[in-house]
Amino acid sequence: MSLVLHLIGFGGMVLAFALSVAPLKAVLEARKTGSLGGLDTRNWTLFFFCNMMWTLYSMEIRDIWLFLSSIVPMCAWLWFCVTGVELLSQEEGELAPAVSRASTNLPHDGPPADWLQDFEEVHNMSAIYRKQAIKSLRGKVAVGMLVGALLSFFLSPRSMTGLEFLDDVFTPSIRLVIFSIL
């Protein structure tokens, strides 16, 4: 039985590692070009936060295979988030969302001055989008780290003077339920 448990744990760790590095090639290419090039970063913080919660949960239940299956993806997604912020701050922004909204208003037969004005409008929209994306990505990572740290602190067993009441409030079964929900 123990051998089967370790084989399943090892298999889960390998799959989790493979899934976490799946976007690595695209992210490395984006770093090489200096632009996200349309990579969608909206879910990256969610993947990071999810793996962070599994890492904290694995430490709570002291499961080495779950820990190894979640710590590598957590670090990978944190690196992807930091890379996303870095690239968004370098480039002129992602034009795809701005262009798709503005493309219906672009004149195709107008004089060059109209095209210049429209280009400037798209450029301004792109800069706004970039600033919002950076702020959102940075904020989500920070909030995820804060929530994870607070949950880890409040749900971990205490042996510190003055905090023993937390062991009475957050019984082991309540801790497991909270971490399972997250």
Image (spheres, grey):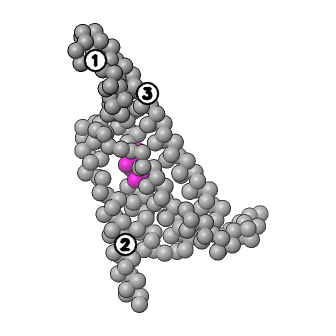
Residue 138 horizontal/vertical position (percent): 48, 41
Image quarter for residue 8? bottom left
| Front disc: 1 or 2 | 1
Q: Which residue is mark 2?
A: 12
Q: Is residue 27 magenta?
A: no
Q: Quick one: label 3 or label 2, which is nearer the N terminus?
A: 2
| Front disc: 3 or 2 | 3
- Residue 161 visible, this orientation: no
Name which residue type carries label 1.
Pro
User: Which mark, by number, is residue 107?
Assistant: 1
Residue 91 horizontal/vertical position (percent): 33, 31
Q: Is residue 79 magenta?
A: yes
Q: Which residue is mark 3?
A: 128
Name which residue type carries label 2.
Gly
Alpha carbon distance from label 1 to label 2? 54 Å
Name which residue type carries label 3.
Ile
Foreground of the two, 99 or 78: 99
Q: Main secondary structure of the magenta part?
A: helix
* Dot 1: element: loop
Alpha carbon distance from label 3 to label 2? 41 Å
| Front disc: 3 or 1 | 1
Alpha carbon distance from label 3 to label 1? 22 Å
Q: Quick one: label 3 or label 1, which is nearer the N terminus?
A: 1
Foreground of the two, 159 or 175: 175
* Quarter of the figure that contains the N terminus: bottom left
Image quarter for residue 32? top left
* Dot 2: element: helix
Magenta range is: 77-82
Q: Residue sitting at 45 percent across and 74 percent down? A: 64
* Quarter of the figure that contains the C terminus: bottom right
